[in-house]
Structure formats: C-alpha cells, structure tokens
Amino acid sequence: MEDTIQIAIVGLGVIGGSFAWALKEQEDFPVKLMGIDRDGRTLDQALAAGVIDQGELVNREILQQADLVIITLYPDDLIAFVKGHRDSFKAGAIVTDVTGVKGGVVEEVVAILPEEVDFIFGHPMAGRESQGFAYADKTVFDQANYLLTPRPANKPENVHFLTQLLTALGFKSVRQVDYQTHDRMVAYVSQLCHILAISLINSDQAGQETADFMGDSYRDLTRIANINAPLWQQLFLHNKEALLRAMANFQDQFDLLKKALEDEDQASLMTLLEEGAKRRLALEKMDFKVQNN
Amino acid sequence: MEDTIQIAIVGLGVIGGSFAWALKEQEDFPVKLMGIDRDGRTLDQALAAGVIDQGELVNREILQQADLVIITLYPDDLIAFVKGHRDSFKAGAIVTDVTGVKGGVVEEVVAILPEEVDFIFGHPMAGRESQGFAYADKTVFDQANYLLTPRPANKPENVHFLTQLLTALGFKSVRQVDYQTHDRMVAYVSQLCHILAISLINSDQAGQETADFMGDSYRDLTRIANINAPLWQQLFLHNKEALLRAMANFQDQFDLLKKALEDEDQASLMTLLEEGAKRRLALEKMDFKVQNN
C-alpha cells in the first residue's frame, strides 16, 4: 500500500456517491478518489463537486491504478463488470462490493477472479429511498452496521485494513459473518418483509377507500412497497433458496392463524397472539441494548 | 335532552377514561359524567381526579339516569353487558360503543335491545398501546377519525347530536359508513396487518441474531405484533368472514410472487414489484391530501 491510497468507485449512484463523499471527508487515511460511471453527467457533477479527482465512462486506466476498488453496481452488473475487467485490476488490489445478497454472487465472481486480486465481499446496512449521485451524502453511513463476508482466501491484513477504513467512514460496527448466515438473515429480516409489503398492497381491493380508512399499521407495513423493482428483482433471484425458505416459514405461521380462525379456536388464537407479543417485547429489549451500546 | 347531559361511561380503561377526560374538558356541552367499572381502584382514581361525579362497580342507578351511554368494553363483554342491562337503560337513551368490528356485534346487540333505546354503533380510529385508566388522556382523540355505522332504526337527530359531541372532543372527522364496508376495510387495513406482523415474528428461526441483523423494515413490520391478545382474539373472531377474505386476497398475491421466484420469472417479478411501488406512491399522494385537509 502506498502512502496515498488510490481508490476507484465503480458506479456513482446514491451508495457509490456516498462512499466518495465519506472517503473525501474522513481524515484517517490519505486517499485519491477516482470514479467510473456510465453516465457522463454524473461524472461531471462528481468532478465539479471536487469529490473525485478523475472520472471515466469506461475504464481506461483507473482500475490499473487502484489499490482499492469499491463496486456499487446491482448484482447482475457487478458480475458482468468483473467478467469484463478481470485483467484490468492492479496486482494485489483489494476489491469489494455492496451487494445485498452474497451466495450466488460470491460463487460467480470468485470463479472468474484472478488469483492476485483480493475480493472481500461486503454489505452496508444503509441506504436511501432516492436514487442517484444527487442524493449521495456521507451521513447515509452514520451509525449504520456493515457486514463483511470474508472467504478463507482473503488476506487477514486486507480484511483488517478494510475494516479500519469503513470505521473511519462513520459505520457503527463492521461485523464479519459467513455468507450463508448473511443470506439467511437478509432473506428473513429484509427480503421477506418486502415480499409481505408488496403482497399486502397488491391485494388491495378497495382503492381510494383504503387511504381514508388506513391508520399507522397499514402505513408502516406498506412503506417498503415503494421498491426499486429492477434492483430487488435481482436481489430476490440471487437469494432464491433462502428467500423461499423464509416464505415457507412465514406461510406455516400464517396457516396456523388461518386454521385457528376458521375453527374459531380461541385457545390456539390466544396462544399464537401471545407468542407474537412476547417475541416483539423480547426484540424491543434486545434492540434497546443494541442501540445503547 | 335536558340542559345538562347525563353521560354514563361503561369501562374506564384507556379509551373509556379518555372519553371521560375529553368530555370533562370540552366546553360545548354541559355534562354530568358517571362511570361504571368492575375495578374499584379505577373508580377511586377517576373520582379522585374529579373526572367523574359518580361511580359504580355494578350498575345500580347510573344507567337509569343516563341520556347517553358510552360502552367501551371488549366485544364479548359488550354483548354480555347489553344482555344483562337491557331493562336498565333510560327510555330514549342513546347508547354507543367503540368496538373495532361491527357485523357480528351489531346483530347480536340489536336482537336483544329494547325498542326505546337508540344504539348508534361507532369506532374511534385511535388508541394507545398501553392499557388502563392511568394512560387515559384526551389527546388520544386529537385529529383522529371516527366512524359511525348508523342503522335505519337510528333517529337522525340522535346521530346528529352524537356527531356534534364527538367533534367537540377533538376528532378530526366523524364519518358515516355502512357496517359491511367498515368491517371489510378494517379486516384489510388493520386486522390483516396484525396477522402479518404476528406470522412474521412467529416465523423467526434465528432468535438473538434477528436483533443484530434487523433494520427499519423488520422493526416497522413487527411493531404491531405487540398485540393485546385477549382483545384481538375477539376482534378477529367477530370479523371472521371478512378477515378470511382479506387473508385469501393476500395469499393470492403472495403466491404470485412465490411462483415468479420459483420459476425465476424476471418479467413477472418486475411486474409485481412495479405494481406494488406504483400503488404505494398513489397511496402516499392520497395520504398527503387526507393529512392536509
């Protein structure tokens, strides 16, 4: 690693742009920031804002210089980008991603990766509902969690370096987890929630009346139905098995409530509702701890 | 109607108590407030706070005096109370309830009601997660919606009077709706949401890890899993048919997403996600209007 760390960000959307801002404004590491984006206006904005020093529409010399490459593309584009640039990375470069699912993506990427490139997969648990560089902002990462899913092939010193750098960007914790656990947990705590929100709002039979009758429950449960469809379609498909398992587990519980209702089985209904209330209270206690540590 | 309106509140929990506070503090109608509650300590608190002028553990003379009776009991207790006191109401009295479902309750109550009592069914779209008189507060009703489900037998002047009185308590709007529409909408915008929250949290396979991985999606979707089980068990059972229909409609949409995922059908997945996003954006536009009117 040289004194000044040469960093390439591939994709200057809201996440890539936020990385650029956060990297520029941190003071622990001397960095040179370079950006690759298929939109010339985005590059112009980022250069004019002084947030990157160099920009390219397609890679010509940026990747060859970069000690660290942060790829913030959608899953399918990430795989295509690595395929198309496998011979452009600097020997010894650290490459990382921000993809919300790991299993399928890691396997495809690792299969095509040159041995001298150290790809450390990661996932910032942060985002914005708005898209594009204009919404990028280093505060996106403030107090958020970062998950790294290192592989045995990753060099410990590189994982350590990336952890230090991410901490300097404002993340509250940088945690290591195996990618199977990551994908199983993401399927449940995030993807299943989106499936439920979409199914709920798509099952609306009333239209206009719904807005008149709804309260906070419906408002909260449908908030994430305002989904980035092209991105989430890829995230769902790349995590198909884990998501289908989470959906099947949900279905089992939904069916128990349905049967208790059909049978007018007060005892079973009480047991299921009390179990839910108990679990939520336990979660709030753990959440409180997490937020105060 | 006499100059001072004699009002009996049956059940001084968080809703009944909030009615008492709001009635005491409004200035449009001169009222005398009386309370019936099975808990002597609750009556003592309400009397000591000066929020009721008279209290009884079981009715002795309160109902006989009351021009207006507001019953804030759970559905099964409401039915039992009306059965047990059908001969105690003052002739010409207006009686109202706050039950969250109507169909089953209305039919059972009307079947046992003396002809000279005018029962106007209603539902304040407001509440607190905490229970009991100690949490009662007139601000519970501030800017909330009130739904009345009048029957052909109700006297228009009584519906008008109740509407004026509720408006004086701080409700933003008092709207009339037939009880079938009420129950269908409540099944969808409220009860189904609670079924989903319970099913989601009860399908957790990870325990402690969930608190570490979760973000706002999971936090928001499970908030209402902290349910008052004895109350909601009754609300679900009294609205069984409408809730099962809402659950079936949800199931249809859930199954479409599941099939698209199983088949890795990108086009169908995109269509379903885009439809959800479109509906949520439309809802936000209507919600904005509602909130600003």
Image (cartoon, coloured by chain):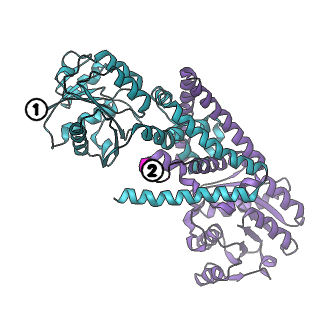
Chain colours: A cyan, B purple
Lateral position of residue A155 relative to residue B256, left or right: left
Tell me the number on the disc at residue A2: 1
Disc 2 target residue: B209
Element under label 2?
A: helix
Quadrant that contains the N terminus of chain A: top left
Left or right of residue B66: residue B223: left
Decide: marks 1, 2 in contact (CB < 8 A)? no
- Binning the other alpha carbons within 10 Å of mark 2 as few (below 14), some (14 to 19) or many (20 upward) gives few
Quarter containing the C terminus of chain A: bottom left
Residue at 29% of width from left, 43% of height from top?
A139
Task: Note whether residue A196 is visible.
Answer: no
Q: Give, as a single range, the part of the protein colored magenta.
A: B205-213
Residue B135 at what x, y percent from top left? 56, 70
Quadrant of the rendered image containing residue B58 = bottom right
Q: Amino acid at mark 1?
A: Glu
Q: Residue at x 46, y 61 (%)?
A: A285
Residue at left offset 15%, top offset 44%: A28
Of helix, strand and loop, which mostly describes the magenta segment?
helix
Note whether B270 is above or below B34 in the view shown. above
